[in-house]
Amino acid sequence: MTELTQKELRARVIQQLPLLVALVVLWMLLWGAISWLNVLTGTIVAIVVTRVFYLPPVELTGRFNPLWFAVFLGRFAVDLVVASFQVAAQAFDPRGVSRNSIIAVQLRTRSDIMMTVTSIAMSLVPGSLIVEADRMRSTLYLHSLNTRDLAAVEKVRRHVLATEARLVRSFGSKDDLRRTTQ
Amino acid sequence: MIPQALDPYLDAIAAICLLLGAFLSLAAGVGLLRFPDALSRLHAATKPQILGLVFIVTAIALTARSWTTLLALIPVLLFQMLTAPIAAHMVGRAAYRTGNFLGELSLVDDLEEAVNRASAESAEADGSTADAEREPGRG
């Protein structure tokens, strides 16, 4: 390992800290108890896991806006409930499934984490499924159930972009924020 | 912590949640049988189940009313929400690429263009079409 200056080392620790804390919290959740022994063993396990299964560090942006995140969560919950019952109704619909589409959506963000979170959010809502993600062009390809006409396709596209914008407002970088909200 | 008088109401809410969760799981099963191709079946297989699980976990939390149970339920939801989209993505991608997908049912297919473009680009680059299965945009 190359020599790191004090500053670089500190930056790296700060960057890894949210992940370590999340792993310790998960460890305590799995044990179902909060105790000092769990914090200690959790920290050891978290450090060993991040050392042994090394992955490129997740680049967090350092911005977090709880208000927009709450807006995102609320909207997500509503979408989840509405869409779940829509897909359920479609499963029982005697006429069967109408037309589906594979829709390319050009995202405006350039960060990997925003793209990942947007696709997870879209995937969790019934009726849309990520078939392919093109990281170089930041394009998502969604399979969407029940798109009767081109207007419905446009609606799905607008919905993805709106989800992206809400997520970027919650914890995207300043650069992404400028790109998505202009 | 929670007044005893609330018990019957909490139990009733838990029962409703269980029924809703069961209904969504049933719908997922019916959709799995009735939807026409692999990609639409994936919608049925992975989606209503997420909300179904949310309902069932809520029901368990409401009946158990203990912190230990609640703490154990959070990772259940968390892992399900993180892994289901990835599983759906992998299966969906494989289904599309192996042609397990009814093209005539689709209104728009933007991916076909992208795959063709990527194949053309890679064919140009190394003078063969053997790499036609490459990801779009990586050519």
Image: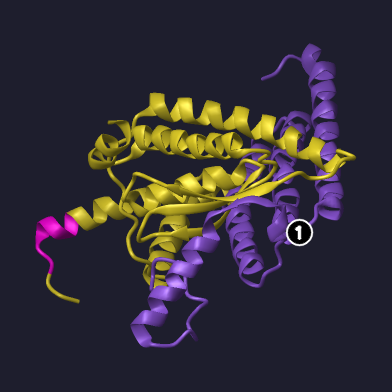
Chain colours: A yellow, B purple
Which quarter of the figure is the N terminus of chain B placed in?
top right
Q: Is residue A22 left or right of residue B37?
A: left
**Residue located 25% across and 50% down the image:** A14
How packed is label 1: few (under 14 Cα within 10 Å), some, or many (20 or more)?
some
Residue A146 horizontal side relative to residue A151, left or right: right
Residue B18 occupies quadrant:
top right
Does B38 appear in magenta? no
Residue B137 rendering spot, x and y as whole percentages: 39, 66
| A44 shown above or below A2 | above
How many callouts does the rendering have? Answer: 1
* Residue pictured at 25% horizontal, 35% vertical: A178
Location of residue B64 (image quadrant): top right
Which residue is drawn at the image coordinates 68% and 39% (left, top)?
A: A148
Indicate the position of residue A110 as horizontal and vertical percent values. 31, 50
Element at label 1: loop
Residue B65 in the image, given as x and y percentages of width and height: 72, 30
Residue A34 visible at all:
no
Q: Looking at the picture, how far across and down is residue A163, in whole percent?
A: 47, 36
Residue range corresponding to the magenta coloring: A4-10
Q: Please state, as top left, top right, bottom left or bottom right, where the C terminus of chain B lies in the image.
A: bottom left
Which residue of the protein is positioned furthest toward the right in this rendering?
A94
Q: Chain of mark 1?
A: B
Residue shown at the point (47%, 58%) measured from the top left = A133
Task: Name the amino acid, label 1.
Answer: Asp
Viewer-nearest residue: A48 or A114: A114
**Depth check, front residue: A98 or A27:** A98
**One can see residue A116 in this view:** yes
Q: Main secondary structure of the magenta part?
A: helix
Q: Which residue is mark 1?
A: B37
